[in-house]
Image (cartoon, helix red, strand yellow):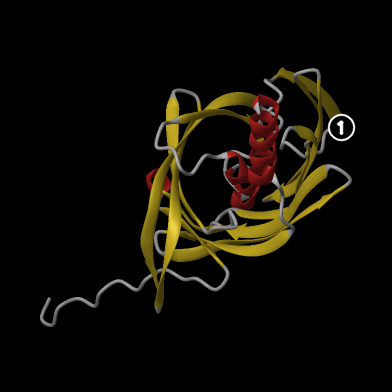
Amino acid sequence: MKTAVVLATALLIGASLAPADSSGKLTVYMGGKPVANESYSIQSADGKIEINGSGAADMGILKITIDQFKVVTDARYHPLEAAAKAQMGKVNMAILTTFSDDKANNKIDSGQGPTSKEDAIHGDDLVINTNLPICAWSMLFPRVKLDSTTPQEFHAYIIGQKEVPLTVTSKGKETVEFDGKSEELSHVAASLPLQEDKTTDIDFWINDAGKIIKAVVPSQSVEVYQQGYAPKPKPAPAEGK
């Protein structure tokens, strides 16, 4: 009987982590105006899971093109390799990272020739960038226990930079209103020090498949919406005001 219980528990855990191939498109708003877009796909094969994204952002004086942000993990979402290629203004940046033995080994080229950088990690990290793309966070939610309100501790590796602690809290299901519709979604709050001595809070609303439908970064006045969803319009000002 004990063996059967252990086996059943293992199967349930495996099911909760089972990847589902999907794709999506995100629009990033800052101060209520669309400033960036992302397209991504998630695929699983041969015991590996891969997210591959691209995008572009127009911040006025700064334009960013994300040619690729790719992360490959094993079936338990432990990173194996990653690649990032982007252009910020006139600066081209390329990073190739491999993960093994609790280390991230980077080859970084910012246009002046490649350099190497090794960082110690825990080996179970979510691989992200300091800002865009948001889609990289999609690899976190299959690991989050949505039925527990206790804060859950993870690690995030900011590609080419460092590992930081990541605290995630499930806030339960909420009705979220959009332009022309509303939907019942799971609210997940994340907190991590993206910059030195400064914690960034990010709120995600995901559907039952773990897809990001909405995200908010309050400190940056940033909102993110999945394709097919748009911000609920603000009420028109009262007449005479």
Relative depth, front residue between 128 and 140: 140
The picture places residue 210, in percent across and down from the top left corner, at 58, 53
> Which residue: 58% across, 69% down?
227
What amino acid is at disc 1?
Gly
**Is residue 45 at all visible to an observer of this figure?**
yes
Which residue appears farthest toward the bottom when viewing the image?
239
The answer to whether residue 122 is above or below residue 135 is: above
User: Splitting the image into 4 quarters, where does residue 99 fall?
Assistant: top right
The picture places residue 103, in percent across and down from the top left corner, at 76, 20
The picture places residue 68, in percent across and down from the top left corner, at 77, 51
**Is residue 67 at all visible to an observer of this figure?**
no
In-image side of 177 versus 229 (left or right): left
SS label for mark 1: loop
Label 1 Cα crowd, 10 Å radius (few <14 / some 14-19 / many 20+):
few
Task: Give the position of the C terminus as an image quadrant.
Answer: bottom left
Which residue appears farthest toward the front when viewing the image?
1
In-image side of 102 versus 207 (left or right): right
> Which residue: 70% across, 27% down?
3
The answer to whether residue 120 is above or below residue 136 is: above
Q: Which residue is mark 1?
A: 113
Which residue appears farthest toward the right when viewing the image?
46
> Which residue: 14% across, 78% down?
238
> Which residue: 59% across, 62% down?
26
Count how many numbered circles sit on residues in the image: 1
Task: Give the position of the N terminus as an image quadrant.
Answer: top right
Relative depth, front residue between 56 and 74: 74
The answer to whether residue 76 is above or below residue 237 is: above
